[in-house]
Amino acid sequence: MEANAPHFKLILGSSSTARRKILADMGYHFTTMSADIDEKAIRKEKPEDLVMALAEAKVVVYEGVVREKPSSEAEARQFMKDYANGHAATVSSVLVTNLVTGSRRGEWDKVEVPLLISSQYSISRQIYFHDIPDQVIDKLIEEGIVLYAAGGLIIEHPLILPYVKEVVGSTDSVMGLPKALTERLIKEVL
């Protein structure tokens, strides 16, 4: 991307490793700054409104209930066990602000994530999991990273990858930064 390097400075307002990787994979050079806010203090009834309010967040909705970052190891364990038996969706948002002009664009993106033991294909943007063994869940909790992920859901983690049966749709959206949406919003604010 050096020959076509953008003529603007890009700041990622998130400390998420996954979001940094996605943006770097898109060819952008950027710095990161994340707000030190209490995400739990910001409440909205609809997940789509919540992620826009947080402006850097991803939430997981399981059986109609918003699941943010697990509050404990026990909650993380329960989240991961549940996913083999139910239906979840990730809801992400992207908010792009041009700090020179003040132009601002944002949207949310939702990915349906039915987590089932199944060999069937389904509609787009879905993920199928094999049952995740207790010893894998134990290792993930011991490592601690699931405590910092919405719904304890980290499909890109090497310990989880063997149990992902099928991803149909946008993995980058599940990871919290949908590439196509991000690219479009950047162009809109320039």
Image (spheres, rainbow, N blue to C red):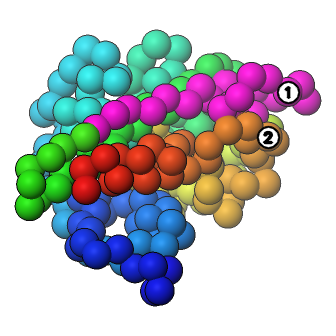
- Say if 87 sits above or below 79 in the image: above
Which residue occupies the foreground of this view, 63 or 99?
99
At mark 2, the secondary structure is strand
Of the two numbered discs 2 and 1 on the same chain, state the one appearing first in sequence: 1
Name which residue lies at 46% across and 86% down.
Answer: 2
The chief SS type of the magenta part is strand
Q: Which amino acid is tagged 2?
A: Glu
- Say if 152 sits above or below 63 in the image: below
Instruction: Provide residue 37's location: percent of width, then percent of height.
Output: 12, 49
Left or right of 166? Residue 171 is left
Q: Is residue 107 magenta?
A: yes
Residue 110 - label: none
The image quarter containing residue 8 is bottom left
- Say if 61 sits above or below 187 in the image: above
Name which residue lies at 35% across and 38% down.
Answer: 93
Judge whether residue 23 can be spotted in this image: yes
**Crowd class of label 1 (few under 14; some 14 to 19; many from 20; radius 10 Å):** few
Residue 166 - label: 2
Instruction: Provide residue 71's location: percent of width, then percent of height.
Output: 33, 40
Q: Is residue 171 magenta?
A: no
Quadrant of image for the C terminus: bottom left
Q: CA distance from mark 2 to mark 1?
A: 8 Å
Q: Specify start and end residues of the magenta stretch as a single range.
A: 106-129
- Say if 73 sits above or below 127 in the image: below
* Circle 2/circle 1 CB separation < 8 Å: yes
Left or right of 81? Residue 28 is left
Residue 121 - label: 1
The image quarter containing residue 38 is top left
